[in-house]
Structures are given as C-alpha cells and as structure tokens.
Image: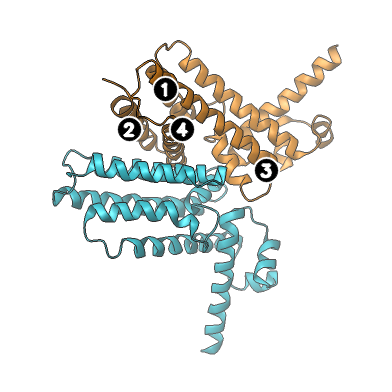
Chain colours: A cyan, B orange
Amino acid sequence: VNTIKKGEKTKNHIIEQSAILMNQHGFLSTPLSEIVEVTGMQKGGIYNHFKDKEELALQAFDQCCSVIQQYIENAIDLKSSVTDRILAFIEAYCTFGENPTIPGGCPIMNASIEADDGQSAKLLERAQFAMQNLIKFLMDEITNGINNKEIRSEIDPQKTATIIMATIEGGILLNKLFIDRSHITTVKDHLIDYVKNELCII
Amino acid sequence: VNTIKKGEKTKNHIIEQSAILMNQHGFLSTPLSEIVEVTGMQKGGIYNHFKDKEELALQAFDQCCSVIQQYIENAIDLKSSVTDRILAFIEAYCTFGENPTIPGGCPIMNASIEADDGQSAKLLERAQFAMQNLIKFLMDEITNGINNKEIRSEIDPQKTATIIMATIEGGILLNKLFIDRSHITTVKDHLIDYVKNELCII
C-alpha cells in the first residue's frame, strides 16, 4: 500500500511541476530536460509513470484546467442569482492570472495554439472539451436566467456564451502580450457592463 | 545587379515560405528541417541570408503582418465614414482566416503565446508593436469619429480599441480551436452590433 501511495505521490509531483512549466513553455514544446530539472527526477523515473511525453502533457493540461476550475468554483460557490454567478465567473476567469498557482495565462489558449496544426490530436481534443465545458456552463446559466426572468428572453444562450468566452480569452491574450493588467481590466469591466446592461432585466 | 536581384529573390522566397509554415507550426518552434524542405534549399543557403533562425522568424512574422495589413487596407480603402472603416476593419480581421495566403490564424496571437516566456524578447517586441498598431488604428478612427460627430463623445478611444481587438482575437482563437466558423461569425456580428448601437450616434 505504501509503495502505491509513494508511486502516486511521485506521479502527482511530476504532473504538478509539469503543469506549471508547460503552461508557460508549451505543453508539446517544453523539452524533457526542463521537466527532469524541475522535478529533480531522471528520464527513466518520469517514463515509469507516463507512457510518453504526450501522455504527461495531457495530464499536465488537465491539471491546469482543474486548478482553474477550482478557482472559479470557489468564486461562484456562494452566489445565488444567475447574474451574480455569471459576473463572478467573468471576474474569476479574468483574474486567475493574478493567482500564481498556474502562471502562463489560459491553458486552453496555450494548448490550442500549439495543437491546432496536427501536432497532437489528443491535446486539441482536450482543449476543445475544456472550452466546451466553459461555454456550456455559461449557456446553462443564461438559460436558467431566462427561465427565472433574470435574463431577457430574446438573448441567445449559445451565442452569448461564445461572445463572453471570446472576449475573456482576447483580454488574457492582451494581458500576456503587454504584461500590463490595464487591458484585461478594461475587458473585464466591459463584460460586466455588457451582462448588466444587455443581458439582465434590471 | 543581377546577382543582388537573385539574392533578394531567394531571400524573399525563404521569408514567404517560412511565414506560411511558421504561422502554423510556430515562429520559434518550427524545426529548420521543415524550412529546408519547404524552401527546397540547404541549411547553408538559408543561413547565407539570415544570421540565425530568430532573424528568419522575425522576418517571417513581419511578412505575415504585412500580408494581413494589405488585406485590411484593401478592405477599408474605399470607405469614407469612420463607422464604415471600423466595420470594414472588423469584417476583414475576422475573415482573413478564410484568405488562404497565411493560414494558421492571427500571427500576433501565435507569436505572443510562443514568445511571452522569454524565449525571444525580439519576437515579443514585434508582436507588441504589431498589436499597438492595430489598437492605434482603431483609436485614431474612434477619435476622428468623435470629432466629426459620428461617434458618441463619451466613448473612450483607447478602451474601446482594446475591447474590439480583444473580442476579435478571442473569436479567432475559438475559430482555431473548433475549426468551425460559427464562433467567429457570432463574434463578428456581435462587434458589428456593438459599433452600430454603442459607439455610433443615431
């Protein structure tokens, strides 16, 4: 039992360290030598736990997503109205970059840029799945909001979810590019106004 | 004279082919072997024209930007009102992905994701400069629009330019991720409504 526990602990250590590294340097393009360095392990020790580098990249990507998901869930947890949950989601997604747990911006964006050219169909699929989940969360909230008369009935849940996610991602890109939080703050404030003024029935 | 011309022609050939390749596979992470293959040239022949791979990447990035800039300039060229120029810019930036000249999405986004971790300060600087130019174009148009009473005076040119560029970039990301034009179409239609309803007088 102790051996299994130790093995799992080592595996989790590799995943956590790789997640931090790969969200900054690339899920596919981070060299194994950097993973060796940051984990303090040998190549062979790493490959005891993952059948290849892609498998490690996929698990590191999932780890990034689950840290962010936890951060967002904490933010929306105590909000009872749909509007407050959508606003808390926007606030959280625009600010998780200030949370030093996973530096490097949005892992879905990072993975998409790397994987869209056929380098890893599996990573692209995971990135699609992660983005679908975010869009679906927003769609479901908007649909609930329409049903309980918080949100205008003429709002299209899918399109609105797409617009919110696109705007957030673009803000994260500008934040990454200019290393200056003014852009993401502008985008966040704009989205908050958009939700309050365009979606909500006062 | 002919030798200079031939040398320049060869250099341009390398830049054009590398631009197409690198916007898809990475300005920094495309292996030289792929550039050798696509240009039909030897390593030595390539390094006759560029002092290193970074220098080639920078010129390939500039080439991508100049193709897109030309595409946008053509789109806005005959528009006389500020509103029409902003709308034509949005339309063009959201659709250059359909233009097969430079596949791989927005080069500024692609370069940012690769270069933000310190891999190439020069590439990051070029990407910042390219994005600044786009934001500045929109800011100047919006300022002109306020001056000539096409655009509401309470609109903040810088913030509005940031919001438009962020939303476009996020739409390009979703288009890249889902290989499905519905997202970028949704984003484009949203921005067109935003300009018409939120920015314009009337």
- Mark 2 or 4 closer to N-term? 4
The chain ID associated with circle 4 is: B
Please determine if labels 3 and 4 lie on a single subunit. yes
Question: Badge 4, how many Cα within 10 Å: few under 14, some, many 20+?
Answer: some
Question: Badge 2, how many Cα within 10 Å: few under 14, some, many 20+?
Answer: some
Give the structural element (helix, strand or loop) at label 3: loop
Q: Tell me which residue sits at (30%, 65%) in the image.
A: A77
Residue tagged 3: B28
- Mark 2 or 3 closer to N-term? 3
Q: Which mark is residue B86?
A: 1
Residue tagged 2: B190
Give the structural element (helix, strand or loop) at label 2: helix
Q: Which mark is residue B158?
A: 4
- Mark 3 or 1 closer to N-term? 3
User: What separation in Å lies between label 2 and label 1 (alpha carbons)?
Assistant: 14 Å
Closest to the observer, B71 or B130 = B130
Closest to the observer, A43 or A71 = A71
Residue type at the position of mark 3:
Leu
Question: Badge 1, how many Cα within 10 Å: few under 14, some, many 20+?
Answer: many
The chain ID associated with circle 2 is: B
